[in-house]
Image (spheres, rainbow, N blue to C red):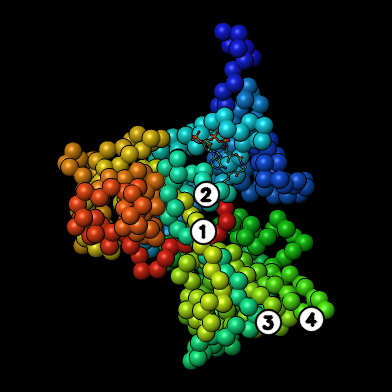
């Protein structure tokens, strides 16, 4: 449609999608991600996600992209549960890229998340690592991709208990739910799940390739096997979807079970924490060849609530000067005060800052997996008072590396 100057209006505009528009968005997103969903997969998607918040991006009334925000709950340091807007399916159709569509979409999503006041942070897994820092997301957790040779030995003296069994499991099986519920409440970066998430993780969308299950009284492993047989014999690959253990004994026993499967040349896991205990159990520590990459990106949407949502390792008081281009309500100087019990609050102040940083750096720090000193060494955080910065760094850190084991 030409505007008053006679030119066609070429802007891309983002707005909330109505329930009856979600199917169209699903088709656009499927094409962007090179999928050709059949009618069943399409219906499953809509059944599962129809009620979530989706935005569409429009060019002259034509839907050319969009994205959704799932309501999830994430574990923050100190075993605190925090609501999070989990961004998903961010897509702009190939003919309309680099025209500000994603920018309009993220802006609309962040504005709405803040306005609703339910989720102080937004989280996502990025298809490419160059996209999201400009929108205030920081790398809060990292992941390692590992490949372990079959039959790889543990260091001497590490026993297992022989309590692992191979079974069939439905998505609501307590042998999965109980260990997951216990562990996910303790591990920073893990997400709480409902039946829809379990169905997705256990491959309801790929009924032709159901996973296998190994269970232990305190844990389980979900895995798939790619059969491979050649002139030299068997060389199958086991891909671990997830291995969850509430005790070290269960952890070692489940791993031993997978490592000792006959006919298997390699056990592959695409995402474990960088400090995955397996890396310390193997007698050949170099065998898994870990490859590090970004995992969960965190965007602080409501600074005051986000900083108060976690626990900290030690008391500290610091004034942070924060820049935030997209969410101006976060911009300014904030006094973060951590009490001796690890609780904290943040208030706007005018006092001189001890540190200056972008909101993306605060997102990177929030889960305790990124060191302040590393950001300062890279020059993205500006340290004015080194003593306060050292104390603040120690307060943010966690004992274990945070990690998000789930693709959403
Ligand atoms: C990634 C994608 C959504 C970007 O959409 P877009 O509408 O082209 O993005 P915009 O025009 O709003 O670009 C915003 C900025 O991001 C940059 N950008 C966009 N995609 C990028 C990429 N893949 N890598 C690095 N930078 C990227 C743009 O250059 C622009 O930079 P600027 O602000 O400095 O000018 C789109 O290319 C796409 O759908 N890709 C395939 C699916 C995908 O990867 N989705 C992301 C899932 S997490």
Left or right of 58, for residue 230: right
Residue 6, by quadrant, is top right
10 Å crowding of disc 4: few (<14), some (14-19), many (20+)? few
Position in image of residue 288 (x %, y %): 56, 74
**First-in-chain label (2 vs 4):** 2
Per the image, the residue denoted by label 1 is 293
Q: Distance from label 1 to label 2 (Cα)? A: 9 Å
Find disc 2 in the rendering and name its residue.
129
- In this view, the mark in front (3 or 1): 1
Circle 4 sits in a helix, a strand or a loop, which is it? strand
- In the rendered structure, the answer to whether residue 2 lies left or right of residue 373 reads right
SS at badge 1: strand
Residue that numbered label 3 is attached to: 261
Give 310 or 372, whichever is nearer the viewer: 372
How many numbered discs? 4
For disc 2, does the CB lie below 8 Å from ligand 1?
A: no
Quarter-of-image position of residue 146: bottom right
Residue 57 x/y as whole percent: 59, 31
C-alpha span from label 4 to label 1: 34 Å
Q: Of the residues under marks 3 and 2, which one precedes in the sequence?
A: 2
Q: Which of 39/408 is in front?
A: 408
């Amino acid at each position: 449609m030409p505007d008053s100057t006679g030119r066609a209006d070429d802007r891309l505009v983002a707005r909330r999608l109505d329930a009856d528009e979600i199917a169209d968005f699903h088709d656009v997103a499927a094409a962007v991600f090179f999928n050709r969903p059949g009618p069943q997969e399409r219906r499953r998607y809509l059944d599962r996600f129809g009620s979530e918040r989706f935005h569409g991006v429009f060019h002259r009334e034509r839907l050319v992209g969009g994205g959704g925000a799932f309501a999830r709950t994430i574990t923050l340091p100190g075993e605190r549960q925090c609501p999070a807007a989990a961004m998903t399916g961010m897509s702009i159709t190939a003919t309309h890229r680099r025209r500000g569509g994603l920018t309009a979409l993220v802006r609309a999503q962040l504005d709405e998340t803040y306005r609703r006041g339910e989720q102080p942070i937004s989280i996502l897994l990025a298809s490419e690592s160059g996209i999201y820092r400009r929108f205030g997301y920081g790398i809060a957790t990292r992941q390692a991709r590992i490949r372990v040779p079959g039959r790889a030995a543990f260091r001497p003296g590490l026993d297992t208990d022989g309590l692992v069994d191979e079974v069939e499991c439905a998505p609501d099986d307590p042998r999965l739910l109980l260990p997951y519920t216990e562990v996910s409440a303790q591990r920073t970066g893990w997400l709480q799940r409902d039946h829809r998430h379990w169905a997705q993780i256990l491959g309801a969308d790929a009924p032709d390739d159901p996973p296998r299950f190994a269970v232990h009284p305190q844990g389980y492993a979900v895995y798939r096997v790619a059969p491979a047989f050649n002139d030299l014999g068997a060389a199958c690959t086991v891909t671990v979807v997830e291995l969850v253990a509430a005790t070290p004994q269960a952890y070692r026993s489940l791993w031993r079970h997978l490592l000792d499967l006959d006919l298997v040349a390699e056990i592959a896991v695409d995402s474990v924490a960088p400090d995955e205990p397996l890396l310390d159990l193997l007698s050949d520590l170099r065998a898994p060849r870990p490859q590090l990459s970004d995992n969960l990106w965190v965007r602080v949407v409501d600074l005051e609530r986000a900083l108060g949502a976690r626990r900290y390792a030690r008391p500290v008081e610091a004034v942070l000067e924060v820049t935030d281009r997209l969410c101006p309500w976060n911009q300014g100087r904030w006094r973060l005060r951590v009490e001796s019990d690890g609780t904290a609050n943040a208030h706007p102040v005018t006092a001189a800052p001890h540190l200056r940083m972008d909101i993306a750096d605060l997102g990177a720090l929030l889960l305790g997996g990124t060191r302040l000193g590393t950001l300062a060494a890279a020059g993205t955080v500006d340290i004015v008072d080194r003593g306060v910065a050292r104390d603040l760094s120690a307060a943010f850190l966690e004992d274990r590396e945070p990690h998000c084991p789930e693709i959403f």
